[in-house]
Image (cartoon, helix red, strand yellow):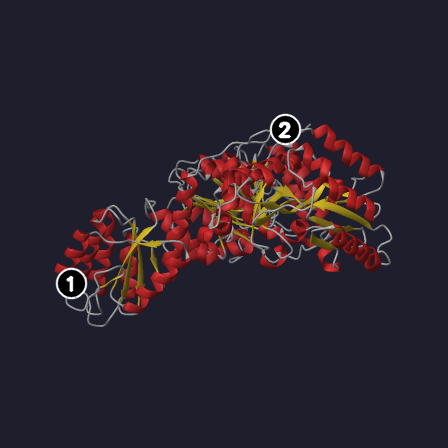
Amino acid sequence: MKKTLAPLSVLFEPRSVAVVGASRRPGSIGAEILRNLISFGFRGPVYPVNKAAEVVLSCKAYPRVIAIPDPVDLAVIAVPREFVLEVVRDCGRKGVKGLVVITAGFKEAGHEGVAREIELQRLTREFGMRVIGPNCMGLINAAEDVRLNASFAGGVPLPGRVAFATQSGALGEAILADARDLGLGIAKFASIGNIVDVTATDLVEAFGADPAIDVILLYIESFGDPRRFTQIARSISRDKPILVVKSGRSAAGARAAASHTGSLVGRDVAVESVLEQCGVLRAQSVRELFTMASAFANQPMPNGDRVAIVTNAGGPGILATDACAGLGLRLATFSNATRRALERALPQGAATQNPVDLIADADATRFQKALTAVGKDPGVDAILALFVSPVTTDALAVARTIAAAPSASGKTTLACFMGKEQSDEGVKILRGAKVPVYRFPEEAASALAAMCRWRRFRERKPGELPRFDVDAAAARRVLAKARKAGKTLLLGGECEPILRAYGLPVARSIVAADVGAAMRFAGEVGYPIVLKAESSAFVHKTEVGGVRANLENGDQLFEAFSDLERRLRPKAKDLRIRAQQQVKGHAEVILGASFDPVFGPLLLFGLGGVYVEVLRDVAVRVHPITDVDAAEMIRSIRGWPLLSGARGAKPVDVAFLEEMLLRLSCLVGDLDDVAELDLNPLIIGADAKRAAVVDARIRLRPKERG
């Protein structure tokens, strides 16, 4: 009978630890883990387990875990893979509730390894154990009342309030070493390996509840359960920043798509969307992760995005200015009082506008006066202090001056220390005062921009999930009928009843059996008319010349109908010609949905029309979306000015577009048969009453085999 799983505290806060595979051979993993536990100062007893030795590192050893006379909370397993399951059974019978399985050779090692990992998971669940690994480098809890280093890391982490979880054991050692070199203190660390039990999401949840942790860092290769990750991360990231490196950005996941949406929404777009909706900040590399983490861990959040740059060199000042502009930060405009204070304090030739250039011979006193002046300015939210170390200047005095600036001003302050003269000592002074220091201005600007993004997320309203009066049953009947007919792709007018059931406006149209039917339809709705060719033989009508618009009279209609029949009938035996009322408006947008096997339905919005895949100006969010999500999607595309009324044009009805996105969200949530959906284009102008979808396609998901 499967037991209830123990809490994660059995892993991070054990009262006793057994090291199974503790070795007397210097440099072996078992020896290093035991040495780390002892040297790091673990507060409880440590029991080496070694069948061939009575004593290991001056500690009494035991041949098996069940031979240990006292209780054992945590077992660290570092034995050859063929012995792991036997050790786990011993641990289960002993009552051990936490395992760290260092040993490799599981699912990463082929079919035999997969079978071994399945049995490992079965056993640990049977005994109610919590497991880190297998194929990992262990975990660390630096809390003073625990002092647990159950890893084979070569160095000791600095004290701090940052937690780090990594899915890559190989990167773990480098991550800890880089954190130490950059002065980043680690409170908890876990290398989770193959994940038979504890996931990155579990750790985010635990770190989020830990008052000793302020910043959460992740290196992940997969989300596990992305919906659970989304739910937990969205909640925790409002209180603590979560910074992540997600690998697999360029993984081949492309597939033939029957829609624009399917070709525009790749797996990495889905990842970006999930993280953005959760308020999780994505770094492109481990180095950038630490760049961001240094700022979050050491400085208060800025109140806004107005930045003052103080430098003793023009070049770095220009680089910082360009980087800030490219990252969406604003250069602060100084008040008159600030400019007068700078003019009094600085010599002739110095620049008193932002960026403030103190010129090359600036000493600590000049830096102090400039930093004080800009620090008092209410229009400044953050300060970037840049220093290039000339031989003639006391760099350490400048470092001490910059280090004192945050406490004097209360403003977020980041530093850039460039040059070799006394640089290392200066960096130590700054880090000791919790001022993040970077090698180049672009890194400092990037870290500050990340802080501003997180601040905006925290200020963002959670949003609501509105529900509309829809006819889901009618839509399901249409899909069921299509299934029965063996269809997997619905085109044009076949989608109309589904869209109308969800309140999405569709231009009036008919499938015209002949040109006479098309003319009778034109007589009912009025000219101009559009003719569209539909067939399973082609996906995009424009690529085969299958759209004829602006047909103003019967002669033009007759000629266009005849041309489509003549050119396309030989290529498409199931050709249908649809006559449609032409919709007038000054903007074309695309609304779409695509089912991702990992993240579920994804929703898309962007500028529409025939060039949508060329322009790729779209925003994507994971279903379901809130009213806040819908508003942000519309405003986040590059073409937003075209919708909001650029250069005197009338703006479109944005509230209407938001409602259309929310109705689409309801549709894909109700109709799980939908794999891909395109509404392209939805033509809209200033009057939403005249807006309408003029082309649509729906691809159905393959039937699951039961």
Q: Nearer the viewer, residue 15 or 408?
A: 408
- Distance Cα–Cα, label 2 vs label 1: 72 Å
- The residue under the point 57% across, 34% down is 96
Q: Amino acid at mark 1?
A: Leu
Quadrant where the C terminus sits is: top right
> Does residue 196 appear left or right of residue 686 in this picture?
right
Work out whether residue 623 can be spotted: no
Which numbered disc covers residue 3? 2
Residue 364 lies left or right of residue 93; in this view the side is left
User: Which kind of residue does numbered mark 2 sit on?
Assistant: Lys
Depth check, front residue: 417 or 646: 646
Disc number at residue 346?
1
Q: Residue furthest left?
A: 344
Element on which disc 2 rests? loop
* First along the sequence among labels 2 and 1: 2
The part of the image, by quadrant, that contains residue 198 is top right
SS label for mark 1: loop
Are there few (<14), some (14-19), or many (20+) residues within 10 Å of tag 1? Answer: many
* Percent x, y of residue 425: 27, 62
